[in-house]
Image (tube, grey):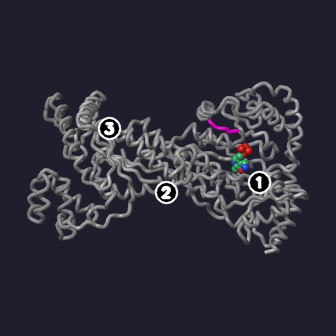
Amino acid sequence: MGRADTPPVLVVGGPTGAGKSGLALRICDTWGGEIISADSVQVYRRLDIGSAKPSRSDRERTPHHLLDFLPLDGDYDAGQFAADARLRISAIRARGAIPVVVGGTGLYLRALLHGLADAPPRDDDLRGALQSRVAAEGAPRLHAELAGVDPTYASRIHPNDGVRVVRALEVYQLTGRPLSAWHAVQVAPPPLAATLLCLDPPRDELYGRIDARVRQMMDAGWVDEVRAILADGFGRDLKSLGTLGYRHLVAHLCDGIALDETVRLIARDHRRFAKRQLTWFRGQPDVRWFTNADAAMATIAEMMETQMNPLEPARLRNLRAYEPGKPIEELRRERALVGPIHKLASNENPLGPSPKAIAAARQALPEAHLYPDGGAFALRTRLAAHLGVPAQDIVVGNGSDELMDILIRAVATPSHHAVISRHGFLPFALSLTSAGVPFSRVPMRAPLTHDLPAMAAAVKPHTRLVFVVNPNNPTGTHIGRDALEAFLRTLADRPDPPVVVLDEAYFEFADAPDYPNSLDYREVYPRLCTFRTFSKIYGLAAFRVGYVVTTPEIAGLMHRVRKPFNVGRVAQAAACAALDDTDFLARTLTLNAAERTRVAAEMAEMGLETLPSQTNFLLVRTPRPGREIYDALLNHGVIVRPVDGYELPDCVRVSIGLPAQNDAMLGALRCVLEAA
Ligand code: PMP
């Protein structure tokens, strides 16, 4: 089934109490979306109960935008909303999700969908001066002034409406032109194609829901919410406290209006407001009307089906499957090759598995009918001794790949955010995307290494995870001790520091004097996760064993998310034994160091640049697109790794193999380059 190139923008409108938020959440759950609130009261912090702000659990379930950010004495208008909402819409679509704009503030929606009347932007100084005058002289005095210069606009607004009086005088003083004259000229609507869906339940039902909702708000402590705000010195002159319901409760608390009467007035004014909203929505073009959410869902389903695979959650729409190194068997099948095939594409150990690990695996085979020890007690104990950390700080996984998913699900939600590096190990981005956690990709610095200061600068208050790969795959580059320490210290100063992942899959290969062991920084930065694996130097990629060293708190969360038997019995036995095989490790290191130097030198002779590597592979810059070189090498029985998926289209990544394999690769590469 085809898929839409860009997710549609849906706007859910309708009167207060009609069930807009519930419908929006259903849309997001079904098709993958994020909610943008178009509600001029929900923008304020602390106006929670009376603005019917979505609950915490709803906000964890579905990302919500443009609510709960403005201080009570803050200023925000439809123009700012439209600009902010457009930015959010682009970002949400870029994540492959559907932006669902929900709200009943007509002016906000009009500004977003059709653009506002052209008028100059605010001028903070002038506005401040006018606001001080309102405070000192009262709004009616300035309203009278306004009537002198813009009688049309003045006649439309209440003399006590200080906010609008100030805006109109500001525009007049800035431009010499009355605001009503500005309003008369509409700018051309910007092209925001959105589908406007409106809920219009039967009148009795709507009024019943409004009454019930007001009662619920009162039961939820609305009066106390307002009392606390007033106790903090906020006054009724604020725009925020002049909103529906809040102004009534301020009158109750300050002027002694009886509570029963207040509740009656609130419900009455909500009903009146609902009527005005309906009138406004009826005046909009191309509205699709529904009496209830089920009817709306059915229509949206039809709409979606023509645009996308109904089973595909929107967040997955831009997700491409990870391209692993091509297996030898596959290449033989595909190209009918008969000679030897050298796979230098997945950074495996060319010496094979550790012999001690093979012996231990054989010994474990007769017990293959028994489930493994889910807690991996023996392996974690062995690792704890090896690393000098408590066993409770270790979680083992089905390769470190699995641990990424577990960690993300354990600590992050779609309301959080993560930071990764642009050419960093790709599966982090895939895991984040499938978990619906938004992330920023920070460019690297020369020579293609993590830019830690830029990554720290990309951390926001809701950033939950930062991923650093050291040394990095596919660049092979590393970051030094000083840079890492400065980075961790900067982040540690934040009020709610993110979890920092140090992926050290190639730790054992790194020998640069300034290469840091992240386990040394556990005191400096408590929310640290060190990822390591048995797939590389230990030669056990087929067994799928990786581990994370972290805090007992994070480990505890990960154990709750992890499936009970995620690492097999034979694999655990092999991994335990491999840790003891120091001779095998030493042979691997010697081979890798010598061959890496030799291969890089021979490539330099061919005129090919390689990046400095602390790993068992080299990133090579190619004179033609890397994928072309990769493809041509396949015909020579050599599998390397194209890295265009990493936005490195002019490179290939080559694993260091046995001398004969490297010779075969270098020979094939020479042929391919000369054939050009
Ligand atoms: N991190 C990095 C940087 C890697 O290169 C790899 C493997 N290519 C992994 C993690 C995943 O390793 P594992 O086999 O343990 O899943």
What amino acid is labelled 2 in the image? Thr
Pair 3/2: label in front: 2
Q: Is residue 504 visible?
A: no
Q: Earlier in the sequence, mark 3 or mark 2?
A: 2
Pair 1/3: label in front: 1
Q: What residue would you read off at disc 3?
A: 52
For mark 1, give the secondary structure.
loop
Q: Residue at x 73, y 72 (%)?
A: 623
Q: Which residues are magenta?
A: 547-551
Q: Residues within 10 Å of mark 1 (few under 14, many from 20)?
A: some
Q: Position of residue 361 (x, y in %)?
A: 85, 34
Q: Quadrant of the C terminus?
A: bottom right
Q: Earlier in the sequence, mark 1 or mark 2?
A: 2
Q: Position of residue 571 (x, y in %)?
A: 79, 35
How many circles with numbers are drawn on the protein? 3
Q: Quick check: 30 above or below 447?
A: above
What amino acid is labelled 3 in the image? Ala
Q: Position of residue 498 (x, y in %)?
A: 54, 44
Q: CA distance from mark 1 to mark 3?
A: 54 Å
Q: Is residue 564 left or right of residue 417?
A: right
Q: What residue would you read off at disc 1?
A: 326
Q: Is 550 inside the magenta-drawn segment?
A: yes
What amino acid is labelled 1 in the image? Lys
Q: Nearer the viewer, residue 541 or 132?
A: 541
